[in-house]
Every structure is written in C-alpha cells, then in structure tokens.
Image (cartoon, rainbow, N blue to C red):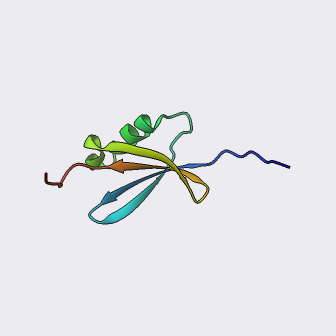
Amino acid sequence: MLIAKVLPRLFIFKDKLQEIKLSDPSPDFTPENVLNFYAQTYPILTTATIEGPKIENDTIQYKFLTQIGTKG
C-alpha cells in the first residue's frame, strides 16, 4: 500500500562558513516569501538567490545563496 505524506521544507544558508538551517515559517509562503521573512533577522539574505528544491533526508531543501563577501 502506498502512503502519501507531505515532506517538510528546510531552508539552508551559509554565513561565515557555518551552515544555518531555518524552519518553514508557513507552508503557505513561497520560497521568496520565506527569504523575505528571514531577511529581517539575517540581513545577509537581502541579496541572496534561491537554489532548489532538492529532496534529501525526507525534506524538501532550498538553499539561499548569499552574494556578500564574494569576489569575481
């Protein structure tokens, strides 16, 4: 028998070589809404782009790729 279940979303970004995992504030939010929501707490996310989704470890993962502090 097949069982369908909703996978939780997880949002990840790196800050100073530390990986920070953020929970989903609302399943009704788009990934862009989540990025804007967390940008209030983490200003580095104001210029971030979104990569994903990728299913891994029974979660739907999105990565916020920050641009601050990179050369080139």
Q: Nearer the viewer, residue 41 or 48?
A: 48
In the current view of this chain or complex, which residue is farthest to the right?
A: 1
Residue 60 x/y as whole percent: 55, 49
Describe residue 63's horizontal placement relative to residue 67 as left or right: right
Residue 15 x/y as whole percent: 29, 59
The structure residue drawn at horizontal position 71% and vertical position 46%, both measured from the top left corner, is 5
In the current view of this chain or complex, which residue is farthest to the left?
A: 72
The structure residue drawn at horizontal position 43% and vertical position 40%, both measured from the top left corner, is 34
Describe residue 53's horizontal placement relative to residue 14 as left or right: right
Q: Is residue 35 above or below residue 23?
A: above
Describe residue 70's horizontal placement relative to residue 58 as left or right: left
The structure residue drawn at horizontal position 45% and vertical position 38%, both measured from the top left corner, is 31
Residue 54 x/y as whole percent: 50, 49
Q: How many numbered marks, from 0 up? A: 0
Residue 64 x/y as whole percent: 36, 48
The structure residue drawn at horizontal position 38% and vertical position 41%, both measured from the top left corner, is 35
Q: Nearer the viewer, residue 32 or 25?
A: 32
In the current view of this chain or complex, which residue is farthest to the bottom?
A: 17
